Amino acid sequence: MVREALATLLGLEEDIEVVAQVGRGDEVIAAARDSGADVALLDIEMPGMTGLDAAAALRKALPGVRIVIVTTFGRPGYLRRAMESGADAFLVKDAPAAQLADAVRRVLRGERVIDPALAAAALAEGADPLTPRERDVLRAAADGRANADIARALHLSEGTVRNYLSTAIQKTAARNRAEAVRIARERGWL
């Protein structure tokens, strides 16, 4: 519903044509390639493949396509990850529709478009301290799995899982794994 509403709003602009819509992240590259899209609007949360993963894959497959992340998750960690994934713009969904159309035009001119308050918050927060493997282990621990189950799922030893969890707990200044997961999610690191 949100995707269709955004497409309708953008379609009302005289100089913008919506050439494709998909509901899954793993359909983005094919749709962009088949339609000849100049700009792709992606959400962070998409089935099949996250918008951040889709952005990175799209940047690699079709480097000329500009990428705008439009999300409800206006968190500094997501902004940082979006930029690292190749996004050209990062907007929250509660921004005015005119701002989205303006962002599309600006990224086509080669500009980056980021909410200034969110950019300042991202700079103040600093970089994500977690390693990719620590993030993997925290994600696996998020549903309450035992270390043995996490170890099997990630092809690690239980001791290695304990070490990664311990380090992640320290880096997030959490008291336990559940709090570490919560903090990492709130900051957009997971």
Image (cartoon, rainbow, N blue to C red):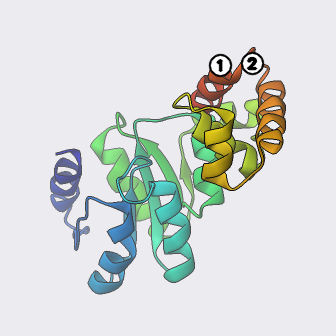
| Residue that numbered label 2 is attached to | 174
Percent across and percent down for residue 54 are: 47, 64
Residue at image x 15%, y 55%? 8
Which amino acid is tagged 2? Ala
Do we see residue 188 in this rendering? Answer: no
- Horizontal arrangement in the rendering, residue 147 relative to residue 64 (left or right): right
Residue at image x 23%, y 65%? 21
Do we see residue 50 in this rendering? Answer: yes
Q: Residues within 10 Å of mark 1 (few under 14, many from 20)?
A: some
Return the disc, 2 or 1, that comes first in the chain's sequence. Answer: 2
- Horizontal arrangement in the rendering, residue 149 relative to residue 102 (left or right): right
Query: Which residue is at the front of the view, 126 or 98?
Result: 126
Q: Is residue 86 above or below residue 9?
A: below
How far apart are labels 2 and 1 at the CA level?
A: 6 Å
Query: Which residue is at the front of the view, 77 or 169?
Result: 169
Mark linked to residue 179: 1
- Horizontal arrangement in the rendering, residue 170 relative to residue 114 (left or right): right
